[in-house]
Amino acid sequence: MKLEFATFGAGCFWGVEETFRTLKGIKETMAGYSGGKTKNPTYDDVCSDETGHAEVVQIKFDPKEISYEKLLDVFWSNHNPTTMNQQGPDFGTQYRSVIFYHSKKQKEVAEKSKDKLNKEKFNGRIVTSIEQAQEFYPAEEYHQKYLMKKGVKVCH
C-alpha cells in the first residue's frame, strides 16, 4: 500500500481536520502549520499573524481508496475559497485558503480543479493559492482531533 500526502488550509484546522478525518481512505490526519518563515512555530506564534504560516491539515491517504480529486472536492465544498484571509469569524493570514501540493500531478489536478470551479461557480473570485508543499509543523497535541475529543462535528 503506497500512501500519499495532501495538505490543505481552509480556515481553523479543527473543522478542516474533522471534515477529512472520517472519510474512507484517510489513514491519518494532523493539524499543523505550514507556508511561513518561522521554524517550529507555536499556536500563539501563528495567531500573531506574523509567521506567515497557515493553519493546515496534513492528510495521509490511500489513493486506491480515495482520489486526490475527491479530496479537492471535499476541500472546495467545506469552506469559502473567495474570502481573502478569512473563514467565518476567523481573520488573518493563518486562515487563508491554500492547497500545498506534494507532486507535479497534484499541482496539475489542483490547478485544473480551481480553474473549473472559477468558471462554473465562482466567476473568477477564488483566492485560494496553490503552492509547493513546505515544511509541515504539527500543532500542539491539544489541537489534534480537537472536535472529536470534544464530541462535536463543527466549530461554528
Image (cartoon, rainbow, N blue to C red):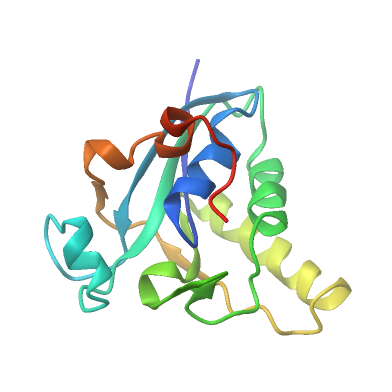
Q: Residue furthest top?
A: 1
As drawn, is 133 to the left or to the right of 4?
Answer: left
**Which one is in front, 7 or 147?**
147
Q: Quadrant of residue 80?
A: bottom right
Question: Residue at (32%, 42%) from the top-left corner?
Answer: 143
As drawn, is 114 to the left or to the right of 96?
Answer: right
**Which one is in front, 95 or 24?**
95
Q: From the top left corner, tell me how far across and down residue 29 is, in percent.
A: 43, 34
Q: Would you say residue 66 is visible in this rendering? A: yes
Q: Would you say residue 102 is visible in this rendering? A: no
Q: From the top left corner, tell me how far across and down residue 146 is, in percent.
A: 40, 38
**Which one is in front, 27 or 20?**
20
**Which one is in front, 85 or 106?**
85
As drawn, is 55 to the left or to the right of 96?
Answer: left
Question: Residue at (64%, 43%) from the top-left corner?
Answer: 71
Q: Quadrant of residue 110?
A: bottom right
Question: Residue at (43%, 51%) from the top-left corner?
Answer: 13
Mark count: 0
Question: Residue at (37%, 59%) from the top-left corner?
Answer: 55
Q: In the rendered image, which quarter contains the C terminus?
A: bottom right
Residue 20 in the image: above or below residue 11 = above
Q: Residue furthest left?
A: 39
Q: From the top left corner, tell me how far across and down residue 35 is, in percent.
A: 31, 65
Q: From the top left corner, tell me how far across and down residue 40 is, in percent.
A: 12, 55
